[in-house]
Amino acid sequence: MPGRPDVVRVAVAGASGYMGAELLRLLLVHPRVSITGVTSDRLAGEPLARAYPHLRGLTELSFHDLDAEWLAEVADLAFLALPHMESQRVVPVLRRRGVKAIDLSADYRLRDPNDYVTWYKAPHTDPAGLAEAVYGLPELHRKAIAGASLVASPGCYPAGAVLATAPLLKRGLAKLDGIVIDGKSGVSGAGRSLSLTTHFSEVNENTMAYSVEGHRHLPENIQELANLAAEAPSITFLTHLVPMTRGILSSCYARLRPDRGWDGTEASTRVRDLYRDFYAGNPFVHVTANPPQTKQTLGNNLCLVYPTVDRRTGRLIVISCLDNLVKGAAGQAVQNMNLMCGYPEGMSLEALAVYP
Amino acid sequence: MPGRPDVVRVAVAGASGYMGAELLRLLLVHPRVSITGVTSDRLAGEPLARAYPHLRGLTELSFHDLDAEWLAEVADLAFLALPHMESQRVVPVLRRRGVKAIDLSADYRLRDPNDYVTWYKAPHTDPAGLAEAVYGLPELHRKAIAGASLVASPGCYPAGAVLATAPLLKRGLAKLDGIVIDGKSGVSGAGRSLSLTTHFSEVNENTMAYSVEGHRHLPENIQELANLAAEAPSITFLTHLVPMTRGILSSCYARLRPDRGWDGTEASTRVRDLYRDFYAGNPFVHVTANPPQTKQTLGNNLCLVYPTVDRRTGRLIVISCLDNLVKGAAGQAVQNMNLMCGYPEGMSLEALAVYP
Amino acid sequence: MPGRPDVVRVAVAGASGYMGAELLRLLLVHPRVSITGVTSDRLAGEPLARAYPHLRGLTELSFHDLDAEWLAEVADLAFLALPHMESQRVVPVLRRRGVKAIDLSADYRLRDPNDYVTWYKAPHTDPAGLAEAVYGLPELHRKAIAGASLVASPGCYPAGAVLATAPLLKRGLAKLDGIVIDGKSGVSGAGRSLSLTTHFSEVNENTMAYSVEGHRHLPENIQELANLAAEAPSITFLTHLVPMTRGILSSCYARLRPDRGWDGTEASTRVRDLYRDFYAGNPFVHVTANPPQTKQTLGNNLCLVYPTVDRRTGRLIVISCLDNLVKGAAGQAVQNMNLMCGYPEGMSLEALAVYP
Amino acid sequence: MPGRPDVVRVAVAGASGYMGAELLRLLLVHPRVSITGVTSDRLAGEPLARAYPHLRGLTELSFHDLDAEWLAEVADLAFLALPHMESQRVVPVLRRRGVKAIDLSADYRLRDPNDYVTWYKAPHTDPAGLAEAVYGLPELHRKAIAGASLVASPGCYPAGAVLATAPLLKRGLAKLDGIVIDGKSGVSGAGRSLSLTTHFSEVNENTMAYSVEGHRHLPENIQELANLAAEAPSITFLTHLVPMTRGILSSCYARLRPDRGWDGTEASTRVRDLYRDFYAGNPFVHVTANPPQTKQTLGNNLCLVYPTVDRRTGRLIVISCLDNLVKGAAGQAVQNMNLMCGYPEGMSLEALAVYP
């Protein structure tokens, strides 16, 4: 099944969930992509448009079962929107057959194999792949991503929280032991699976904290920030569910290092300038002059970041937001694909926020 | 207009807003209250049931304009659900005429008159009243409230945040300089007035931080906690709007004082026990064994408090929630009234949460 | 387990769902009820307050499995909030042992046993019980309910739709063959069970029709209206899901009988007067002068009914609304219990709407 | 200010409202459009990106006041997203200066000038423009739109309701006197203006009927259907507000003409085939095999139409849905622009629904 030379043949494994659906939304209108396969063990054989009526008329594809060899046959590049522990069964086959992979699960995000035992109660079964995988946050690893054949796209919380705090730690502005990240997420982050915490009557008109004992997105946060700070920060990370479908807003609190002399009246402006400098040349991070709102990112690939200094306490506050299914998942993955294929970084990611 | 001896004649000034409506919901079924007056300058002359169709058939009252002498005439006790700066024009008249008052505005909450200049850009015009007013949080000031003739009911955020952190500071458990309070509020906290931040199409499917430069509820938080700690804590307080009508969830972060030796594996249990001990005998504070949800307080007068210790960082996390219009406003005020009148503290406040 | 003579011992079978939870909300504060048993096969042995944290502190009850003999032992009256086909297994035991029953399932609503075969694909297994059961809509059957030992509480849609149209058909005002009922329901009507149609991310920001091939609430609608009209009306009944938790609004359309001369300019007023006359003495039906809103019934036991005549087409429009879990289920059932026990009809049903 | 020959210079008058914002969302990524002016009397002088932060970085435009001569100067084609009665002050200038106009207000929709007096209580001030205007529903008037210089884009309700019922009336399938259209709309249809009916706390968890005395979108419905049926139908049209931001779902009920013999068991299939035939070649109307949901149109330009026959009553039910801001307003207008400019009809309208 050879394709046109200027078009990459792409497959989406795990296409029946929300990340899969969002990948299809972006890829179906991508001018240099041909979608050649979608998988879902549960829906194998069923037309894609039956599971997702909003794709009706746009594709003739049907779900195939999850078969790594078949994926390698039909595609030059595969997106893996699979549960954790499943991607590491598929990736070794893809690598052997020379197929590029962008994994949206947690399987290839943590550099230290021991972390998997700690957080997922099982050893990693593909340490060789793990050693080669690149963490797919272009704002920190653009060059490595462009040359990678296996990219681990970030979790939805870390995407926003790392972008909110990276400049602080890279520039040594904040203490490493006083960091609090308070995340608020819409419900689609929990996927399409059924549980009381995705039941409308339970979630609507409700706000709650969850995973209070420790959310699995914490270690990648620490890993990426430790890379920048050259030392692991101590982070309290608490996640909340708010009654909306899409969007994550993270409020990050850190103590300024007093020896840096950044606590005067101009502190907020200076911090903002530092952020703008840090993110210059990154089309999908906007450093804003006013607190951002998740609705400003609904359906687009932006991460909005607003740093300020609380003049009463001298503490730093950084607020970031993004659409958990776009810059927090599928859009980020497509941005990674564009880099890996030598396409313009923003191709097929130009859509504006759907406001209101 | 003398009433039955076992019934208090009650007026609600500013009854056309949400706090006023909520006071009426609770007072109309209170067995020892007779509502004798409601005011609204905007709606003066109009029947209450026209502004609030859900009260149809329950009351024959019409709105009167805001006239302090008239209030003093018709009522033994007045609830003031007025904008700040207006209560302090009414209260002196009520005090002169011996009418008890429960103020739901911010006008009588701060002990230090200078704070009004700082936060409201105007001097307080009733320093004598201010000197006598009692902060209306029964869990901290029950006895004083019972003997007071002027009570300042707390703001909706402080109600939950002070209850979440009071035991920590009273018992010297936490450092005073590392406190972060991240509050998430439903939209009814902004009242019935019209603005883009209460417009459905703007707020729905949206989460945002607001009042980032400093929310006016901060100083009462500090005042009450300073009372307990005998020193003013340094608090970063950030408020967020989430797309629901009722409810506030506050996530509070503090650093444990290491010299207290509370960072072992049993820390969470020990902290919870300390909280239960602190709130013993307080019917409207429940210390919970699991993270609470705002929906568990929808329409009831409870504040749910969940303290825990983040075992990775040794930091304290306390999550509290309440219905901003009940324990955060009208229910709290009725609880205060019950104490001031010698009624059972929970009278007319027994309703269960409307779940789901 | 004998109770106080002035208190009825009450059990709730199927207490783990939303109807069960709502029954408990109303019964726990009922002054002449003692709740002596709750059942749930799935949660047998578990404390009630674990399944429903908002009931914490209010009850020591634990779930029992669904055992009809045990129910008959502990209770004088049982509410059955069970799936259809299950109630008819429990009711015969209760009847034999002289225990009153209020069934909230569909099992005893239809007089004609053949209807069960048509709509539920199975014959009724308790035709004797069926023959004695009274349809539990007090506005039409108050006297029969007061003397009944088995009452079939109406479905949530029919409760509102029958009340909206009963006066029309009883008084012969409308043609029997042009009736359209367009119902819009919140999500809690689908219960606490998990499916894509109760998944927040699917339902939020979405409106859809469902059960287009025929909703099971249609036959009781026709039965009750046929009783009044002495002939079965032809009704097109279409149900819709709207993104809210509670509430049903039904818009009913009918053609006036031209021979009745009700199409003049005063038609709307005359129809409203007729409705008010019809519902005089019914405390829980309010005939309103303006179109009602579901929020005006949130948490209360009212059905609001607004009849009007479309002056352009001469057609009747009647809009009704109620809280599907209160007047549409649990509140209605408690109202029936009050009648069956000789209590005041509105006991424990006085709470006002939780607005906003 | 001459543009590139292959690009049309476009202005948006009334760009500060939701329709204006949605036009900008679609036009900013249109490959053959250059936006040369935006107006808002209220925001004149302010950068567009301050009013709409989600447009930040995409445009340097600032609001100009509403000046028809200026519009004619800067643009070849103007979209008028103005309140009714304002467009008819601007259009005569544009026509005189040879600038094409697409009016999204109601000002040029009704062929009969008397209708304006009836519905808007004022005579039309531009009868000459009115006589030339084409009703901008491409599925009915494609050829006329392509040749028009003034197009009146349909209202959001009629867009869906006319598409739902046009095949019925054109093919003589339904009686003309038994038609009921029950519309359910999200809140953005009411625009960005402030009122209690757009206040989050009033609208959330609420469903209500509104404009019960007659919605202004009725006459264009009747006009368009009368054109097809060669006789004016009698329509009862009732509009409802449901708690979501975008989307309209219309449920249409009609009686089949019995002489057409369409009431057998195959009736639904035959009606669907007739609809598919009617809409063949129309890329933005999908006749669906299952009841559609508004979420399937969120952000896209589709109208989904589902016709069926109620086998119990033989009555026709047709359900249609669309995004009120896209196919119900801005998308429709851009579709009209594409036709008027000789561009591919779907240019810039290819985006998929944002699901979930």
Image (cartoon, coloured by chain):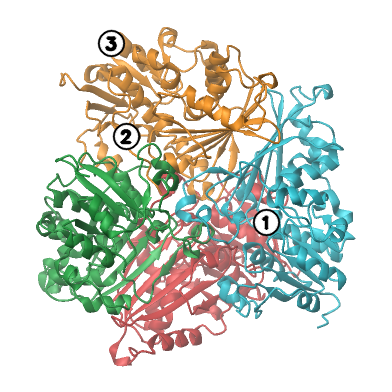
Chain colours: A orange, B cyan, C red, D green
Relative to residue C36, is residue A221 depicted above or below? above
Chain name for mark 3? A
- Give the spatial CA distance, label 3 vs label 1: 61 Å
Instruction: Using the rendered image of the protein, determine whether residue C233 is visible from the camera's viewpoint.
Output: no
- Nearer the viewer's eye, disc 1 or disc 2? 2
- Give the spatial CA distance, label 1 vs label 2: 47 Å
Question: Residue B180 at x, y = what percent?
Answer: 68, 35
Looking at the rendering, which quadrant does residue C267 occupy? bottom left
Which residue is rendered at x = 27% and y = 21% of the image? A343
Question: Residue B84 at x, y = what percent?
Answer: 70, 59
- Give the spatial CA distance, label 3 vs label 2: 30 Å
**Mark identifier at residue A98:** 3
Q: In which quarter of the image is the C terminus of chain D?
A: top left
- Nearer to us in this view, A138 or D264: A138
- Provide the residue designation for mark 2: A350
Q: What element carries label 2?
A: loop
- Provide the residue designation for mark 1: B300
Graded by Cα atoms within 10 Å as few (under 14), some (14 to 19) or many (20 or more), the crowding at tag 3 reads few
Question: Residue C329 at x, y = what percent?
Answer: 53, 63
**Mark identifier at residue D112:** none
Look at the numbered discs 3 and 1 and tell me whether their residues touch, using CB distance below 8 Å: no
Graded by Cα atoms within 10 Å as few (under 14), some (14 to 19) or many (20 or more), the crowding at tag 2 reads few
Amino acid type, label 3: Gly
- Nearer to us in this view, D228 or B346: D228
Of marks 3 and 2, which one's residue comes earlier in the chain? 3
Question: Residue A125 at x, y = what percent?
Answer: 44, 11
Q: What element carries label 3?
A: loop
Which residue is rendered at x = 70% and y = 57% of the image? B329
Chain name for mark 1? B
Amino acid type, label 2: Glu
